[in-house]
Amino acid sequence: MSRFRILRVDYYDPQITGKKTRFLHTIYILIPFFIMTAFNLGQLFGMGYLLTIIILIPFLLLIWIFLIRKVRSEIKNLKTIGEIEITKSGIRKRLGDATYDYNYQIIKCLHLSKHIPATRIMESKTRYFSYILKIILWNKQEELLVVSDRSLDHNHKISLAETMRTLKKIVPFEVTIEL
């Protein structure tokens, strides 16, 4: 069906990195509301229109620039270490020179959860730049992989979430998608 990049996170727990980045992204999104609220409060307390703008805009603009650079630096720090190919018969994982094949009979569950939000429209189709794919096998082994949202084949038109929704209809085991 599709191939996706496997990414390396420079932290021992990729879920913590994703939560921190999503929190910063939420603050980044709320800045226009802070601007409107602060402007209205300035007008309520009798500050002049021009004085409110002169104080408010540069301060919040600096915070906005800092947050967007921080989130984009997190995305830039992700390095490609391999690729994962999801087919109708199984999952093939390539890390460097090693190749691992997982037939769907040995997989107990697949779990997809969000990781780092996208900051540009071209980075993602589903608002997230990367996802955490958890593969649980019947022999109690688990693998956590940070996987990019855009496919390597199909000219980057298919997202990982769409592939997992299609896979959910095909395979006999549980596929969980947290978006």
Image: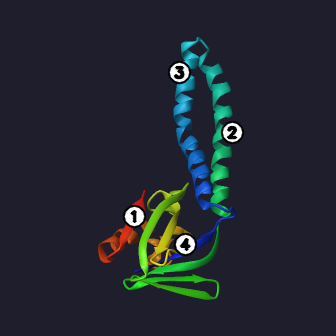
Q: Residue 40: which numbered mark, if any?
A: 3
Find numbered disc 3 in the image and state the secondary structure of the residue it sits on. Answer: helix
**Label 3 CA crowd tier, 10 Å (few <14, some 14–19, many 20+):** some
Q: Position of residue 163 (x, y in %)?
A: 39, 72
Q: Earlier in the sequence, mark 3 or mark 4?
A: 3
> Of the residues under marks 1 and 4, which one precedes in the sequence?
4
Residue at x 34% of width, y 71% of height: 168
Residue ID for mark 4: 143
Question: Which residue does the image show at 31% across and 77% down from the upper left?
Answer: 170
Label 2: element kind = helix
In the picture, residue 2 is in which quadrant?
A: bottom left
Q: CA distance from mark 1 to mark 4?
A: 15 Å
The image shows residue 31, relative to residue 94, as above or below, that is above
**Distance of label 3 from label 4 (alpha carbons):** 50 Å
In the rendered view, tell whether residue 18 sits above or below residue 56: below
Question: Which residue corresponds to mark 2?
Answer: 62
* Disc nearest the viewer among 2 and 4: 4
- Is 128 situated left or right of 108 in this image? right
Q: Position of residue 13 (x, y in %)?
A: 63, 60
Compare residues 88 and 176 and report the one nearer the observer. 176
For marks 2 and 3, give the CA distance. Answer: 20 Å
- Specify which label sits upstream in the sequence, 2 or 1: 2
Query: Looking at numbered disc 4 in the image, what kind of residue is underneath it?
Result: Glu
| Residue type of the residue flagged with mark 3 | Asn
Residue 149 visible from this viewpoint: no
